Amino acid sequence: MKVLKFGGSSLGTPERIRGVKEIIKGQSLPCIVVVSAFEGVTDSLLRIAELASRGNSDYKAELDKLIDIHRNFAKALLSDPDDLNNASDHIEVISNELGEIFRGFFLLRESTKHALDQVLAVGERISSLIISLFLDDSILKDSRELIKTEGKPGNSVVDFKATNQLIKAAFEKTNKLTVLPGFIASNHNGDTTTLGRGGSDYTAAIVAAALKAEVLEIWKDVDGFMTADPRKVEKAYTIENLSYSEAMELSHFGAKVIYTPTLRPVFRENIPVLVKNTFNPEGKGTLINNK
Ligand code: ADP
Ligand code: ASP
Ligand code: MG
């Protein structure tokens, strides 16, 4: 069993998602695929929430634009009319849900952390649905039924005991290609929670650790873990091997290529992590392990 995670930077356009499908098709082991929201969607949701809670009615037009983007992704990717109808129905339901929450923010001139979690979760709920319909023979599971958090909204932590049991039970009898939304979870009351910005990396690591996966592959838009952010440092180059502690240290001190809490669960279970480039799948990437 292998866990592959594709972040927003790998999911910016329908064309990019076709590339992701090729990478998944090329795998020999059974795979669980964790996906983020499409690129920029979580930021847009936050911006719309802010507009609404400031009493700016432009939020409605912004929401319509965001929903249209998802409709267009679905149209571009789903050739089977049943799949397209299925996606469109879900998008409609989610759009109405969001419209009501934002109207609440607009009327009250405020948002709560709890309601914001519900808003932000929408990006991954829609992307995972569209991607699972697009991938042949895959099933979709809802990470909110697998990952349990405790604590206050905006400050919640994973309840690993409950989470590991749920994940193991869910995958005990299946080897089928499964798509999971990253970033989203739920608390013990069943309310939607999130794992923090960039949290889809963490989702993938939690799942890989619970199932003792052979490897966790984190697919990004760069050739691996580099000596610095290549957007800022021209001469940055890829580091081929890192130990867990080196990678955790770099991540704690600001290397934003991996969400900081990600490495802890895989380190505990000694699961190797490969950081790969969706746009250069042949590249070696970075291997993080205990060496
Ligand atoms: P995703 O959203 O797809 O998970 P991110 O945007 O969170 O991906 O992370 C990838 C980005 O991280 C790269 O485009 C790069 O600009 C940035 N980055 C920051 N530090 C590093 C580093 N040390 N090595 C590689 N990329 C880095
Ligand atoms: N979509 C979420 C974010 O942008 C989680 C993730 O992409 O990892 O923060
Ligand atoms: Mg991201």
Image (tube, grey):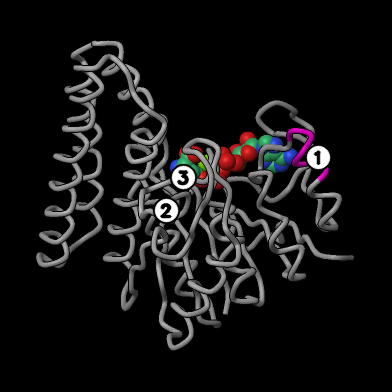
Mark 3, Cα crowd under 10 Å, few <14 / some 14-19 / many 20+, is many
Residue 148 visible, this angle: yes
Quadrant where the C terminus sits is: bottom right
Asked if 229 appears above or below 211 in the picture, the reply is above
Which residue is identified by label 2?
186
Residue that appears at 53% across and 50% down: 150
Residue 231 is situated, as x and y percent measured from the top left of the image, at: 65, 30
Instruction: Please report the residue visible at 25 percent of the width from the left and 57 percent of the height from the top.
Output: 77
Q: Which residue is mark 1?
A: 227
**Are there few (<14), some (14-19), or many (20+) residues within 10 Å of tag 2?**
many
User: Closer to the N terminus: mark 3 or mark 2?
Assistant: 2
Residue that label 3 marks? 194
Q: Amino acid at mark 2?
A: Ser
Residue 276 appears at what percent x and percent y?
64, 57
Q: Amino acid at mark 3?
A: Thr
Residue at the location (53% across, 38% down)?
A: 197
- Look at the magenta stretch and give its main secondary structure: helix
Q: Nearer the viewer, residue 284 or 154?
A: 154
Name, please, the residue furthest toward the top.
55
Query: Distance between the Cα atoms at labels 1 and 3?
Result: 29 Å
Residue 93 inside the magenta-drawn segment: no
Residue 94 is left or right of residue 39, and the answer is left
Q: Position of residue 271 (x, y in %)?
A: 72, 70
In this view, the residue in front, 170 or 28, is 170
| Mark 1 crowd level (few <14, some 14–19, many ≥20, 10 Å Cα) | some
Kindly state the secondary structure of the residue where label 1 is placed. loop
Q: Which residues are magenta?
A: 249-254
Viewer-nearest of discs 1 and 2: 2
CB-based contact (under 8 Å), mark 1 and mark 2 = no
Query: Is label 3 within 8 A of ligand 2 (CB to nearest ligand atom)?
Result: yes
CB at disc 1 and ligand 1 closer than 8 Å: yes
Q: Quadrant of residue 98?
A: top left
